[in-house]
Amino acid sequence: MHIDTITPADFAWQAQAQALCAQTGADFFFPEPGSSVREAKRICGMCEMRPACLEYALENDERFGVWGGLSEKERLELRRTTR
């Protein structure tokens, strides 16, 4: 029997004091379908860790929520245009 080992994601960038998402409720970054992501994007726009967050989301194919200031659709479009 073979059991694959899943390597845990590296959230070190998020644990740093500069990551504003670590200081804010997840509701902003994972809103209900159809809800506005404006507030999450505003918070991301002020965050020093935004580039690391976006890089993490793209490398790990995060499909839900706002990461690095981009919504799911925006990250999908970015993936398509950078291929």
Image: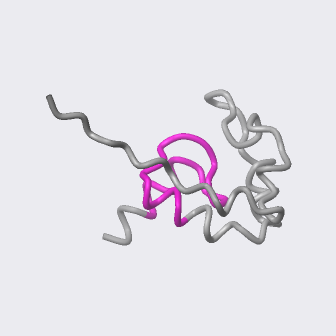
Side of 2 relative to 15 (left or right): left
* Location of residue 63 with respect to 59 vertically, above or below: above
* Location of residue 42 with respect to 65 vertically, above or below: below
Residue 31, horizontal then vertical, whole percent: 69, 33
Residue 46, horizontal then vertical, whole percent: 83, 66
In this rendered view, identify the residue nearer to me: 60 or 83: 60
Residue 60, horizontal then vertical, whole percent: 44, 54
In this rendered view, identify the residue nearer to me: 66 or 9: 9
Q: Residue at x 41, y 49 (%)?
A: 7
Q: Is residue 79 magenta?
A: no
Q: Residue at x 61, y 68 (%)?
A: 52
Side of 42 relative to 80 (left or right): right
In this rendered view, identify the residue nearer to me: 22 or 40: 22
Q: Residue at x 48, y 47 (%)?
A: 8
Colouring of the image: one colour
Q: Residue at x 81, y 57 (%)?
A: 20
Residue 24, horizontal then vertical, whole percent: 84, 45
* Location of residue 58 with respect to 64 vertically, above or below: below
Give the mark count: 0
In the rendered image, the quadrant that contains the N terminus is top left
In the rendered image, the quadrant that contains the C terminus is bottom left
Side of 22 relative to 61 (left or right): right
Quick one: which residue is furthest to the front in this view? 1
Q: Which residues are magenta?
A: 55-78
* Location of residue 76 with respect to 29 vertically, above or below: below
Q: Is residue 57 magenta?
A: yes
